[in-house]
Image (cartoon, rainbow, N blue to C red):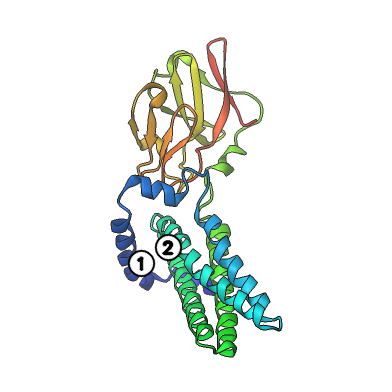
Amino acid sequence: MQILRRVEEARFLDAPGDKLQSAVTAATKPQRLKDFLHGAWLGHPLHPVLVQFPVGSFASAALLDLLPGRGSGRAATTLIAAGLAGSAPAIAAGLQDWSQMGPERRRVGLVHAAVNSVALGLYAGSLVARLRGRAGLGKLLGFAGLSTAGLGAYLGGHLAYAQAGGTNQAAPETIRVPEEWTLIGSLADLPDGKPVVRTVADVPLLVYRLGDRVTAMIERCSHETGPLGDGEVRGQGRDACVVCPWHGSTFRLIDGKVVHGPAANDQPLLRTRVTGGSVEVSSR
C-alpha cells in the first residue's frame, strides 16, 4: 500500500501521462466513438467487460500448458493468439476511461497500462516461440506473462476499488438522503424548465420542474463529482440535458439518463412527489 501511495503521488508520471492523454484525445475525437468506448450505452464502463476475454484466454492457456500432450499445446497457442487479438479493444476502452480521470488515478492507471504492456509483450514472445517450435520457452514466457498480468490486475483493482475509478461516485450520496419524505420547497418556487440546486441533509440536489412534474438527481456528477449545478443546460423540455463543467458528461434532466460520457452510469435520482403544492423527496 505504501508503494501504491507513492505511485499516486509520483508527479514525474504526469509528463508522459499528459502526452499519452493528448494522443488518446486526438485519436478519439468523434463523440459517438467516445461514448461507445466509455460504455455510456451499456450503463457501466466497457473496459471491465472487454478484459474478460484476453484474461480468460491467457489463464486457460496456462492451465493447458500444465497438461501433457501436443493437443493441449496447440490449443494453448490458439488461446494466446486469441488473447492478444482480444486485448486491442480492451486497451482502447481502458485508455479512453483513463484519459478522463483525475491526476492520482491517471498515475496509477499509467503504471497499470505499462505493466499490462509488459505482460502482452511476454505473451507475444510466447506466441512466437511456440510457432517456431520452442514449446518450453513459450510456456516459460506464458507463465511470466500471466504473473505480470496478475500484477496489472492488482493495480487495476486498486484503481477501481480504492480510488473509485470508473464507479458511480454519486451513488453513495443517495444513502445520506432521508428515507422519509422530506420537504425541499414549494412547486411555485421552482422555475419551469430550468434546473436549480436544493440541499437535503447537506446533500446538494439538482431539481428540475417540467409543468407539474419534478425530478431530483444527485447534483455531484457520477463520473468525478463535478458540480452539475454549474453546468450548461442544453435543449428544452423533456430533451433538456445538463453538461458537467469538469469533463463534459451529459445527463437528461427528466430521468438522469447518461447521454454522453465520460460518465458511463446514469445520474442517481431520488423519489419525488408533490403534495399540496409542496415538493418532497425520499431516498427510497
Circle number at residue 104: none
Circle number at residue 106: 2
Callout 1 secondary element: helix
At label 1, the amino acid type is: Gly
Q: Quadrant of residue 231?
A: top left
Query: Residue 76, position in %: x, y?
Result: 61, 76
How many numbered discs sit on the rendered protein? 2
At label 2, the amino acid type is: Arg
- The reply to whether callout 2 and callout 1 are in contact (CB within 8 Å) is yes
Q: Is residue 112 visible?
A: yes
Q: Quadrant of the C terminus?
A: top right
Q: Quadrant of residue 272?
A: top right
* Residue named by callout 1: 17
Q: Residue at x 55, y 66 (%)?
A: 54
Q: Between 194 and 141, which is closer to the camera in this rendering? A: 141
Query: Residue 146, position in %: x, y?
Result: 58, 76
Q: Quadrant of residue 93?
A: bottom left
How far apart in space, not on screen, are marks 2 and 1 (Cα)? 7 Å
Q: Residue at x 60, y 78 (%)?
A: 74
Q: Between 143 and 157, which is closer to the camera in this rendering? A: 143
Which residue is most to the right? Answer: 68
Q: Is residue 21 above or below residue 132?
A: above
Callout 2 secondary element: helix
Query: Residue 189, position in %: x, y?
Result: 43, 16
